[in-house]
Image (cartoon, rainbow, N blue to C red):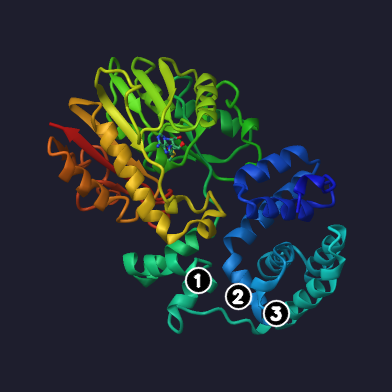
Amino acid sequence: MVVDSLPPANDTDCRLLAYQVLRRVAAGGYADLTLDAALRRSALASRDRALATELVYGSLRRRASLDYALAPCCRQPLATLEPAVLDLLRLGAYQLLFLDRVPAHAAIHSSVELTRQLRLQRAAGLVNAVLRALQRRQPQLRWPTAEEDPLGWLTATLSLPDWLAQRWWNQYGLQPAGRLAACLLLPAPLTLRVNRLQTTPAQLLAQLAEAGYAAEACRYAVDGIRLLQPVTDLTALPGFASGAFQPQDEASQLIAPLLQPQAGQRLLDVCAAPGGKTCHLAALTHNQADILAVDLHAHRLRKLEQGARRLGCQRVQTLCLDMRLSDACLPDAAFDGVLVDAPCSGLGVLRRNAELRWRRQPDDIADLAQLQQQILQQAARRVAPGGRLLYSLCTTTPEESDAQVAEFLRRQPDFELEPLQDRLPPELLDAQGCLRTCPSVHDGMDGFFAACLRRR
Ligand SMILES: C[S@@+](CC[C@H](N)C(=O)[O-])C[C@H]1O[C@@H](n2cnc3c(N)ncnc32)[C@H](O)[C@@H]1O
């Protein structure tokens, strides 16, 4: 299906827009970027934009639950259906099962109409029959419970892929894994990092209140503000254009301060783009540190540069480099602080990347761990004596966190682990003194890990 050849969405077809985005995601796109681009191009009213957004994220997050409910209503196995038709069924099923505000007849009728509009007439009868069967069966639909069928509870009721359900059950225990899975079905909170180069949290909170936005200070991140209402257009918030804030999860805001950056230092951020933490380092040092921001991807570094300009960050230089292969392009002099915010399995940010739970595969974790260790080893060579190497991730798998730190220390005897008790409250620390956050435990923050390694 070539999505661009379809007619553009108008006021009545938020379902068409949602369908187009799902097809793009199936072809490898990112749900958030694809949806943002589609909404920018569309003329949908704000209520329809909200429905399209809900349909995209809801049907992606709850895909396994939808398939569990749809399977007995369809004569053939779901896996043998045309992928486009299966997406139409999932969209219809999501409205039937999880959206109170859409009447059942509207959910079914609009799905059948959309099937025809997409020139999939041959499937219109099937879509109609399957969704009507689901509507009939809905009152008797029984979702697996933790007591009767623990794995079914995590996979069908709470919509985790099998491998992740098993992994989290082993890692956290059944009930905590279920609480985490349930939390990851909800939208992530919108959190802003106030840019101290431009304003203060008190000033921005006052500006937001004046503009009619409900918001509050974050519990852990000193410069964090959490919006208490959905916001569809960030750029419309007061202070966006003047660089008063950067959208950044609260857990992510805890990372840069752990390096204890100081004015006058030389800092290196080796997996820097799109620059959330680079810009935070610039703010923490009042633009008085030299920061070199390195990333593998030039297009992502362009985003970092744009963000740094908007926020008024100075003394930030960028360098496009594969940190695995060689650090020959880096300046010779060592750095006082090095941040390795490494590419990772991203299991701590599944709420923000709705497609990731289906795209991530169990074998990726070992591959990513290998990549992280290579980057860490290269980065370590640039840390000055007494300097810090901060390793952070938006995941908490043991392979990418504890095991990685242990392997690093084994290979780098002149480094030691610096516990973070002086920088963080005890509830955010693990037994080794590393940061470890979990969305279902720590006030809805994303799941992050960070370890501070200090060169003797
Ligand atoms: C978790 S993201 C970094 C997020 C960033 N620190 C922030 O706060 O906005 C990981 C980054 O690592 C980069 N990356 C992946 N492999 C790399 C490599 N071999 N060398 C350098 N950067 C790499 C990716 O392009 C990606 O931008």
Which SS class for mark 3? loop
| Residue at point 22%, 41% (across, down) | 420
Which numbered disc, 3 or 1, marks the residue closer to the eye? Answer: 3
Measuring 16% from the left and 45% from the top, which residue is drawn there? 410
* Label 1 Cα crowd, 10 Å radius (few <14 / some 14-19 / many 20+): many
Circle 1 sits in a helix, a strand or a loop, which is it? helix
| 10 Å crowding of disc 3: few (<14), some (14-19), many (20+) | few
Q: Is residue 361 left or right of residue 122?
A: left
Question: Which quarter of the picture shows residue 210?
Answer: top right
Q: CA distance from mark 3 to mark 2?
A: 14 Å
Amino acid type for the residue under numbered disc 2: Tyr
> What amino acid is found at the position of numbered circle 1 in the picture?
Thr
> Considering only order in the chain, which callout, 1 or 3, is on the residue closer to the N terminus?
3
| Mark 2 and mark 1: Cα distance apart in space | 9 Å
Quarter of image, ligand 1: top left
Residue sitting at x 85%, y 51%: 12
Residue 62 seen anywhere in this rendered image of the structure: yes
Q: Pointer 1: what residue?
A: 155
Disc 2, SS: helix
Q: Indicate the amino acid at tag 3.
A: Gln
- The disc placed on residue 76 is 3
Which numbered disc, 3 or 2, marks the residue that appears first in the sequence?
2
The crowding category of the residue bearing disc 2, from other C-alpha atoms within 10 Å (few below 14, some 14 to 19, many at least 20), is some
Q: Residue at x 56, y 78 (%)?
A: 143
Whole-percent x and y of residue 440? Answer: 42, 58
Q: In this rendering, is residue 431 above or below 205?
A: below
> What residue sits right under mark 2 in the picture?
68
Label 3, label 1: how far apart the Cα atoms are? 21 Å
Does the CB distance between marks 2 and 1 fall below 8 Å?
yes
Seen from the viewer's position, the closer of residues 273 and 181 is 273
Give the mark toward the camera: 3 or 2. 3
Image location of residue 298, percent across then percent down: 51, 28
